[in-house]
Protein backbone atom coordinates (compact mmCIF):
# COMPACT_ATOMS: atom_id res chain seq x y z
CA UNK A 1 0.00 0.00 0.00
CA UNK A 2 2.90 2.34 0.81
CA UNK A 3 4.48 1.59 -2.60
CA UNK A 4 1.23 2.44 -4.36
CA UNK A 5 1.14 5.73 -2.49
CA UNK A 6 4.76 6.43 -3.53
CA UNK A 7 3.97 5.61 -7.17
CA UNK A 8 0.93 7.87 -7.06
CA UNK A 9 3.01 10.72 -5.61
CA UNK A 10 5.73 10.25 -8.23
CA UNK A 11 3.15 10.08 -11.02
CA UNK A 12 1.54 13.31 -9.85
CA UNK A 13 4.91 15.10 -9.65
CA UNK A 14 5.94 13.84 -13.10
CA UNK A 15 2.55 14.86 -14.48
CA UNK A 16 3.34 18.41 -13.37
CA UNK A 17 7.00 18.46 -14.43
CA UNK A 18 6.79 16.76 -17.83
CA UNK A 19 4.30 19.23 -19.39
CA UNK A 20 6.60 22.10 -18.39
CA UNK A 21 9.52 20.45 -20.17
CA UNK A 22 7.37 19.71 -23.21
CA UNK A 23 6.23 23.34 -23.33
CA UNK A 24 9.83 24.53 -23.26
CA UNK A 25 10.64 22.04 -26.04
CA UNK A 26 7.73 23.31 -28.16
CA UNK A 27 8.89 26.88 -27.61
CA UNK A 28 12.36 26.01 -28.88
CA UNK A 29 10.87 24.21 -31.90
CA UNK A 30 8.77 27.28 -32.75
CA UNK A 31 11.78 29.56 -32.43
CA UNK A 32 14.04 27.37 -34.66
CA UNK A 33 12.16 25.02 -37.00
CA UNK A 34 15.11 23.31 -38.75
CA UNK A 35 15.20 19.55 -39.30
CA UNK A 36 18.36 19.14 -37.21
CA UNK A 37 16.77 20.88 -34.28
CA UNK A 38 13.69 18.72 -34.69
CA UNK A 39 15.77 15.53 -34.65
CA UNK A 40 17.75 16.62 -31.61
CA UNK A 41 14.64 17.67 -29.75
CA UNK A 42 12.97 14.36 -30.56
CA UNK A 43 16.04 12.48 -29.40
CA UNK A 44 16.08 14.47 -26.16
CA UNK A 45 12.42 13.73 -25.68
CA UNK A 46 13.05 10.04 -26.37
CA UNK A 47 15.86 9.97 -23.79
CA UNK A 48 13.60 11.67 -21.23
CA UNK A 49 10.88 9.14 -21.98
CA UNK A 50 13.44 6.35 -21.59
CA UNK A 51 14.45 7.77 -18.21
CA UNK A 52 10.85 7.81 -17.05
CA UNK A 53 10.15 4.36 -18.50
CA UNK A 54 13.23 2.99 -16.75
CA UNK A 55 12.17 4.60 -13.50
CA UNK A 56 8.61 3.24 -13.62
CA UNK A 57 9.59 -0.15 -15.11
CA UNK A 58 11.49 -1.24 -12.01
CA UNK A 59 9.74 -4.00 -10.01
CA UNK A 60 7.49 -2.66 -7.32
CA UNK A 61 6.36 -5.95 -5.75
CA UNK A 62 3.00 -4.45 -4.87
CA UNK A 63 1.25 -7.76 -4.27
CA UNK A 64 3.89 -9.26 -2.01
CA UNK A 65 4.97 -6.12 -0.26
CA UNK A 66 1.55 -4.76 0.54
CA UNK A 67 1.20 -7.15 3.43
CA UNK A 68 4.77 -6.35 4.51
CA UNK A 69 4.04 -2.63 4.48
CA UNK A 70 0.84 -3.24 6.39
CA UNK A 71 2.73 -5.42 8.83
CA UNK A 72 5.59 -2.93 9.14
CA UNK A 73 3.67 -1.19 11.91
CA UNK A 74 4.21 -4.16 14.14
CA UNK A 75 7.68 -5.34 12.73
CA UNK A 76 10.89 -3.34 11.93
CA UNK A 77 11.61 -2.35 8.33
CA UNK A 78 15.27 -3.30 8.60
CA UNK A 79 14.51 -7.02 8.36
CA UNK A 80 13.27 -7.15 4.72
CA UNK A 81 11.28 -4.27 3.30
CA UNK A 82 13.93 -1.65 4.05
CA UNK A 83 16.62 -3.58 2.17
CA UNK A 84 14.34 -4.04 -0.85
CA UNK A 85 13.53 -0.32 -0.93
CA UNK A 86 17.22 0.58 -0.74
CA UNK A 87 17.98 -1.87 -3.58
CA UNK A 88 15.27 -0.25 -5.72
CA UNK A 89 16.73 3.20 -5.07
CA UNK A 90 20.23 1.98 -5.93
CA UNK A 91 18.93 0.43 -9.17
CA UNK A 92 17.24 3.71 -10.06
CA UNK A 93 20.47 5.58 -9.43
CA UNK A 94 22.50 3.14 -11.54
CA UNK A 95 20.04 3.38 -14.43
CA UNK A 96 20.14 7.17 -14.17
CA UNK A 97 23.95 7.22 -14.15
CA UNK A 98 24.07 4.91 -17.18
CA UNK A 99 21.66 7.05 -19.17
CA UNK A 100 23.57 10.21 -18.22
CA UNK A 101 26.86 8.62 -19.27
CA UNK A 102 25.32 7.48 -22.58
CA UNK A 103 24.03 10.97 -23.23
CA UNK A 104 27.38 12.53 -22.37
CA UNK A 105 29.13 10.17 -24.78
CA UNK A 106 26.61 10.99 -27.47
CA UNK A 107 26.88 14.73 -26.84
CA UNK A 108 30.68 14.56 -27.27
CA UNK A 109 30.25 13.48 -30.97
CA UNK A 110 30.95 16.24 -33.59
CA UNK A 111 27.88 18.07 -34.67
CA UNK A 112 27.22 21.26 -36.60
CA UNK A 113 24.55 22.48 -34.20
CA UNK A 114 26.43 22.88 -30.92
CA UNK A 115 23.90 25.24 -29.39
CA UNK A 116 20.99 22.87 -29.97
CA UNK A 117 22.98 20.00 -28.43
CA UNK A 118 23.70 22.13 -25.38
CA UNK A 119 20.01 22.93 -25.04
CA UNK A 120 19.10 19.26 -25.36
CA UNK A 121 21.78 18.36 -22.83
CA UNK A 122 20.41 20.95 -20.44
CA UNK A 123 16.92 19.57 -21.01
CA UNK A 124 18.01 16.00 -20.26
CA UNK A 125 20.10 17.19 -17.31
CA UNK A 126 17.09 19.03 -15.90
CA UNK A 127 14.98 15.92 -16.34
CA UNK A 128 17.68 13.93 -14.55
CA UNK A 129 17.66 16.43 -11.69
CA UNK A 130 13.90 16.13 -11.50
CA UNK A 131 14.16 12.34 -11.34
CA UNK A 132 16.85 12.62 -8.66
CA UNK A 133 14.51 14.90 -6.73
CA UNK A 134 11.79 12.29 -7.10
CA UNK A 135 14.16 9.58 -5.82
CA UNK A 136 15.09 11.75 -2.86
CA UNK A 137 11.41 12.40 -2.20
CA UNK A 138 10.82 8.63 -2.30
CA UNK A 139 13.62 8.13 0.25
CA UNK A 140 12.08 10.80 2.45
CA UNK A 141 8.72 9.03 2.19
CA UNK A 142 10.32 5.73 3.26
CA UNK A 143 12.02 7.43 6.20
CA UNK A 144 8.74 9.05 7.19
CA UNK A 145 7.07 5.64 6.98
CA UNK A 146 9.74 4.16 9.24
CA UNK A 147 9.32 6.98 11.74
CA UNK A 148 5.53 6.66 11.47
CA UNK A 149 5.91 2.97 12.40
CA UNK A 150 7.58 4.00 15.67
CA UNK A 151 4.94 6.69 16.17
CA UNK A 152 2.16 4.14 15.69
CA UNK A 153 3.89 1.84 18.18
CA UNK A 154 4.04 4.64 20.72
CA UNK A 155 0.38 5.46 20.03
CA UNK A 156 -0.52 1.80 20.52
CA UNK A 157 1.39 1.81 23.82
CA UNK A 158 -0.47 4.95 24.86
CA UNK A 159 -3.77 3.29 23.89
CA UNK A 160 -2.89 0.23 25.96
CA UNK A 161 -1.94 2.45 28.90
CA UNK A 162 -5.20 4.38 28.54
CA UNK A 163 -7.16 1.12 28.34
CA UNK A 164 -5.47 -0.10 31.53
CA UNK A 165 -6.19 3.22 33.24
CA UNK A 166 -9.80 3.00 32.03
CA UNK A 167 -10.16 -0.49 33.47
CA UNK A 168 -8.62 0.71 36.72
CA UNK A 169 -10.99 3.69 36.81
CA UNK A 170 -13.94 1.38 36.16
CA UNK A 171 -12.79 -0.83 39.04
CA UNK A 172 -12.41 2.22 41.29
CA UNK A 173 -15.86 3.46 40.27
CA UNK A 174 -17.32 0.03 41.05
CA UNK A 175 -15.59 0.04 44.45
CA UNK A 176 -16.86 3.56 45.20
CA UNK A 177 -20.36 2.51 44.12
CA UNK A 178 -20.22 -0.55 46.38
CA UNK A 179 -18.96 1.61 49.25
CA UNK A 180 -21.78 4.09 48.62
CA UNK A 181 -24.34 1.26 48.71
CA UNK A 182 -22.85 -0.10 51.95
CA UNK A 183 -22.86 3.40 53.45
CA UNK A 184 -26.49 3.87 52.42
CA UNK A 185 -27.43 0.58 54.07
CA UNK A 186 -25.52 1.59 57.22
CA UNK A 187 -27.31 4.95 57.30
CA UNK A 188 -30.66 3.22 56.90
CA UNK A 189 -29.80 0.85 59.77
CA UNK A 190 -28.73 3.80 61.95
CA UNK A 191 -31.94 5.62 61.07
CA UNK A 192 -33.94 2.55 62.10
CA UNK A 193 -31.99 2.36 65.38
CA UNK A 194 -32.64 6.05 66.02
CA UNK A 195 -36.34 5.51 65.42
CA UNK A 196 -36.33 2.59 67.87
CA UNK A 197 -34.47 4.68 70.45
CA UNK A 198 -37.02 7.46 69.96
CA UNK A 199 -39.87 4.99 70.56
CA UNK A 200 -38.13 3.70 73.72
CA UNK A 201 -37.64 7.26 74.96
CA UNK A 202 -41.31 8.02 74.34
CA UNK A 203 -42.32 4.90 76.25
CA UNK A 204 -39.95 5.86 79.07
CA UNK A 205 -41.52 9.32 79.25
CA UNK A 206 -44.96 7.72 79.42
CA UNK A 207 -43.80 5.37 82.19
CA UNK A 208 -42.29 8.28 84.12
CA UNK A 209 -45.55 10.17 83.78
CA UNK A 210 -47.52 7.16 85.02
CA UNK A 211 -45.10 6.67 87.92
CA UNK A 212 -45.51 10.31 88.86
CA UNK A 213 -49.25 9.94 88.80
CA UNK A 214 -49.04 6.77 90.94
CA UNK A 215 -46.74 8.55 93.38
CA UNK A 216 -49.14 11.45 93.66
CA UNK A 217 -52.03 9.03 94.19
CA UNK A 218 -50.04 7.22 96.90
CA UNK A 219 -49.32 10.49 98.66
CA UNK A 220 -52.97 11.46 98.54
CA UNK A 221 -53.95 8.02 99.86
CA UNK A 222 -51.44 8.33 102.70
CA UNK A 223 -52.85 11.71 103.61
CA UNK A 224 -56.36 10.31 103.59
CA UNK A 225 -55.30 7.33 105.73
CA UNK A 226 -53.60 9.65 108.21
CA UNK A 227 -56.67 11.86 108.39
CA UNK A 228 -58.87 8.80 108.89
CA UNK A 229 -56.57 7.53 111.64
CA UNK A 230 -56.78 10.86 113.36
CA UNK A 231 -60.56 10.80 113.17
CA UNK A 232 -60.65 7.22 114.49
CA UNK A 233 -58.35 8.17 117.34
CA UNK A 234 -60.56 11.09 118.26
CA UNK A 235 -63.69 8.89 118.16
CA UNK A 236 -62.01 6.19 120.27
CA UNK A 237 -60.90 8.71 122.89
CA UNK A 238 -64.35 10.20 123.20
CA UNK A 239 -65.88 6.73 123.45
CA UNK A 240 -63.41 5.75 126.16
CA UNK A 241 -64.19 8.93 128.08
CA UNK A 242 -67.89 8.18 127.84
CA UNK A 243 -67.39 4.61 129.03
CA UNK A 244 -65.21 5.82 131.89
CA UNK A 245 -67.80 8.35 132.96
CA UNK A 246 -70.48 5.69 132.86
CA UNK A 247 -68.35 3.34 134.94
CA UNK A 248 -67.65 6.05 137.49
CA UNK A 249 -71.32 6.94 137.63
CA UNK A 250 -72.30 3.30 138.19
CA UNK A 251 -69.66 2.93 140.83
CA UNK A 252 -70.88 5.99 142.70
CA UNK A 253 -74.44 4.74 142.56
CA UNK A 254 -73.34 1.38 143.87
CA UNK A 255 -71.49 2.94 146.76
CA UNK A 256 -74.48 5.03 147.66
CA UNK A 257 -76.73 2.01 147.74
CA UNK A 258 -74.28 0.14 149.93
CA UNK A 259 -74.07 2.93 152.40
CA UNK A 260 -77.87 3.09 152.76
Image (spheres, helix red, strand yellow):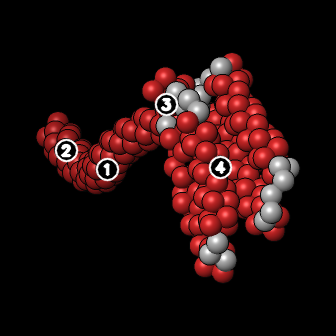
Assign a secondary structure to mark 3.
Answer: helix
Residue 161 visible in the picture: no
Q: Nearer the viewer, mark 1 or mark 3?
A: 3
Task: Give the answer, above or below, for where 70 lies relative to 120.
Answer: above
Classify 10 Å Cα crowding around label 1: few (below 14), some (14-19), many (20 and above). Answer: few
Does residue 156 appear to the left or right of 185 in the view shown? Answer: right
Q: Find the distance from the CA under tag 4 to the CA under tag 2.
A: 174 Å
Q: Residue at x 59, y 28 (%)?
A: 72
Of the numbered discs in the image, which one, if any, rests on residue 47? 4
Classify 10 Å Cα crowding around label 4: few (below 14), some (14-19), many (20 and above). Answer: some
Q: Earlier in the sequence, mark 2 or mark 1?
A: 1
Assess whether mark 3 and mark 2 are in contact (beta carbons under 8 angstroms). no
Task: Give the answer, above or below, for where 107 lies relative to 196.
Answer: below
Q: Find the distance from the CA under tag 4 to the CA under tag 1.
A: 114 Å
Q: Circle 3 is placed at which residue position? A: 62
Residue 236: x and y, percent? Answer: 23, 46
Q: Earlier in the sequence, mark 1 or mark 3?
A: 3
Of the numbered discs in the image, which one, if any, rests on residue 202? 1
Q: Nearer the viewer, mark 2 or mark 3?
A: 3
Q: Residue at x 55, y 36 (%)?
A: 57
Assign a secondary structure to mark 4.
Answer: helix
Assign a secondary structure to mark 1.
Answer: helix
Q: Circle 2 is placed at which residue position? A: 243
Does residue 148 appear to the left or right of 238 in the view shown? Answer: right
Q: Find the distance from the CA under tag 2 to the CA under tag 3.
A: 152 Å
Assign a secondary structure to mark 2.
Answer: helix
Q: Earlier in the sequence, mark 2 or mark 3?
A: 3
Q: Earlier in the sequence, mark 4 or mark 1?
A: 4
Q: Find the distance from the CA under tag 2 to the CA under tag 1.
A: 61 Å
Q: Earlier in the sequence, mark 3 or mark 4?
A: 4
Q: Residue at x 62, y 75 (%)?
A: 33
Q: Find the distance from the CA under tag 1 to the CA under tag 3.
A: 92 Å
Amino acid sequence: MAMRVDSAILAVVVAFLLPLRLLSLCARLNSSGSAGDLRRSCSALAIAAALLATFFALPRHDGGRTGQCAASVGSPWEEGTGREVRLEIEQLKLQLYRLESLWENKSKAPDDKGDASEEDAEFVKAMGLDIQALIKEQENIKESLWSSGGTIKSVENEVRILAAESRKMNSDIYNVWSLANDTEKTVEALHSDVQKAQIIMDESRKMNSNAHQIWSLAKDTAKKVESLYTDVAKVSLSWLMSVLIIVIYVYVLFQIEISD
